[in-house]
Amino acid sequence: MGKSLSMKNITKRYPGVLALDHVSIEIKAGEIRALVGENGAGKSTLIKVLSGAVTNDEGEIRVGDKVFPHITTLQARENGIAVVYQEGSLVPSLSVAENVYLGKRFGRLVNHKALEHMAAQTFEHLGIKVNPGTAVANLSPAYRQLVEIVKAVSQDAEIVVMDEPTAQLTVDEVEMLFGIIRRLKADGITVVYISHRLDEIFEITDSVTVMRDGKYITTLDTKETNKTELIEYMVGRELSLSYPRSSKPPGEVALELENVTGNGDKDVSLYVRGGEILGLGGLVGSGRTELAKVIFGAASAKTGTILVRGAKVEIKSPKDAVSRSIGLIPEDRKSEGCFLKMTIQWNVALMNLRRTGTRFFVNEKNEREQALRYREALKIKTPSVAQLVGNLSGGNQQKVVLAKVLAAQSDILIFDEPTRGIDVGARSEIYELMVRLLEEGKAIIMISSDMEELLGMSDRIVVLGEGRVRGELAREEFSQQKVLELASVE
Amino acid sequence: MKKQKSVVGSFLRKNVILLLLVAMIVIFSIAMRAFLSVTNLMNIYNQNASLLLSSCGLAMIMISGGIDLSIGYIASLCGVVAAILMKNYGVNIYVAILAALVIGAACGALNGFLSNRLRIHTMIVTLATMTLFQGLSYIISGSKSYSSLPAAFKFLGQGYIGKVPVSIFLVALIIAAGSFFLNKTHFGRYMYAIGGNPDAAFLAGINVGSVRQRTFALNGAMVGMAAVLLISRSGSASSSMGTSLQFDSITACILGGVSFTGGAGKIGGVVLGVLCLGVLSNGMQLVGWGIYTQYVVKSILLVAAIAFDLYTKSKELADREGE
Ligand SMILES: Nc1ncnc2c1ncn2[C@@H]1O[C@H](COP(=O)(O)OP(=O)(O)OP(=O)(O)O)[C@@H](O)[C@H]1O
Ligand SMILES: [Mg+2]
């Protein structure tokens, strides 16, 4: 059975940041509550207070009928609180089963067979197809996320908290996740659900709490509100929900692939022109990220040709790609995108040392100005660009990755899930920015699992499936159904 | 409540090495009047001049995510070759010094090359090449020791201008250059990048292998210079000289806050680390503790430093968990 939860007057300060400012929320047992707000609003911090990962400076927490001034991780676990963090906590080298039962003791020795059997049952119960014996390292980010969720749920949880569980998932897996949540609800378990994808909130939650700048704003009944109202509460102003379009027609072909095979992709041909966005659609595992890596030289193409501005090129490494003015925003910000131990300024400068400095030397003053410019343009929420990237909220880390690649001023940009974890307000800033890039004549290839974004921003969409091109759609033909049909044909 | 604790905690974590150094200096100078004399302070410097250089070199390697266990035998090899060139072949001292630097750089480049080519961790590679360099050093020296090196050469390590050792200028210059290099050049940035997150560095267009190889070569040259100072100070060379440098350099780097897992560290910290080690050895000598007791104390210090590094790391992780 689920427990009710209430947090009163929770305050948390970091140097220069008031992350939580007397936040109070109350959640009934068995309720599914959404938590929304801009990047850096304090959502993750609030649930970290709840799980004991962060200690609140003020306030109290009530779980069921127990009251705590602060809660420790152990107390949280004992009281049935389970958290699925925004970023993974799985051990890649261990198997799925071992990860799910990590930290739970069953006698002295590990009985792998028994563990796997138990895990298999849990997965089946929740309707997820994954072999419990595989190492987590071999799973796609989406499946890792699902395993993460199962891990949390399997610890006799009474309150399950999910921090952006769908950021890595595409339509299919989101459905699986919703299946899990519905089952939890049927069991009477309380769920706190954080997401920047508002559609999901309307589909799955009972009520929604909005936070802004570390403050509690309001709680609404999901049935009695709508997107526009919710966004207004989140950003504190009205926001247009339409996708901006470039005013200029596309130019010459900037990048062309002819029969490219390699890294799991087979016989891919496509092109993108300056001034247009080519969207890549497909399910997880369709070979989109793999293709991006081939184009960028991070994985090698076995056969086929790549042409940049009409000239055949050999791209053997990302270094070659960068020198040909190609930029990649990688899919996984934590492992491939940012340097958590370094400052924002340092990260943003890394790919642009020549332009801010000289041939050999760096110029910290220019780097600082550059970082300040991007902080402004991408609304990176931080008191200072000397802040370590590791101290930023998830969405703001993603913005730093964007800034780093944009600062290199490449002509051909590959965006792999560019707005993952970024809030609605900042999203529209990023779309505006992309349009500005298009108007400067840059070519953009965008991989996105967010269907609305894919349909809204692309000029053309190429759909991949199992590493092959399944078809191409012109803007007039765009529809969610067409993309899904192409993506799932055998 | 936790907040004050963590602010004090983070100040302590950041400055623990400085506090340790100050504490040792206070204790030793109370215990022995001789400790704070100019002669003794110069002594401490002299005993650690080579270590300063090799530690700075190693710091760059550790910042870029590697480790070098072969430092001691690179030094041994460089020292022996330079001495033989001067003694047996009458080579000009500048050429001999240059030869030591080049050989050091070549050894380092070999380490980097093997690690890149075989795709194995630098710890394993340098464990293997350590024995290689050791073997080469003994073959070349024929297990003999080469003494009475040219006076002009010995001046580098033994000479004084007033009360100040000549080499201090050289060492200070090299260390300042190293620090400048790490902080102000593209290459220095790349060292931090490949140590902090190699995958992200690769996707940022950095040639990770090349940066690693050049870092190792640079360290090799630093070690070559360390060897030159070492034999010049003692006026003789043999294959067993300099071999303690690797252990001491690793200890100094870790004491000085260079992360064992790469991506973090400052030259300033490393200098403090060396001073700590130096003050400790010197103090223990003055108190009259034997060399083996000193080993025990140093190793306790190393374990403590590693534990502290891990503790700090887990602290940072906890602060960040879930992001
Ligand atoms: N360890 C820390 N040191 C300094 N500031 C921090 C630290 N952790 C969080 N913050 C700051 O606290 C604020 C709230 O961050 P939090 O992670 O809760 O945001 P969020 O609402 O989860 O955002 P997102 O949607 O981007 O995940 C941010 O401004 C962030 O920079
Ligand atoms: Mg968050």
Image (tube, rainbow, N blue to C red):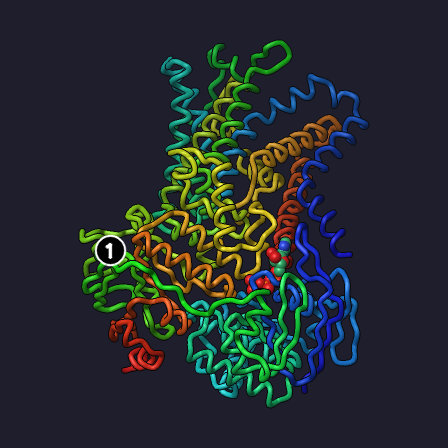
Q: Secondary structure at mark 1?
A: strand
Label 1 amino acid? Ala
List the residue tagged with mark 1: A254
- Tell me which residue sits at (49%, 13%) in the image: B148
**Residue A433 figure quarter:** bottom left
Residue, x 74% and y 30% (percent of image)?
B25
Question: Across the whole image, how many numbered discs are drawn on residues?
Answer: 1
In x, y percent, where is residue A49?
69, 66
Q: Quadrant of residue A352?
A: top left
Front-most of A394 and B281?
A: A394
Residues B293 and A36: in front is A36
Q: Tell me which chain the residue with mark 1 is part of.
A: A
Ligand 1 is found in the corner quadrant, namely bottom right
Q: Is residue A353 above or below residue A380?
A: above
Mark 1 nearby-residue class (10 Å; few <14, some 14–19, many ≥20): many
Q: Quadrant where the N terminus of chain A lies?
A: bottom right
A11 left or right, relative to A462: right
Residue displayed at 30% across by 46% down: A323
- Position above or below: A84 against A442: below
- Along the viewing direction, whichever of A287 and A485 lies nearer the viewer: A485
Q: Residue at x 51, y 15 (%)?
A: B156
Reply above or below: A33 against B173: below
> Is residue B317 among what the camera can see?
no
Can you give x and y, in whole percent of width and height, for residue A212 in the image? 62, 64
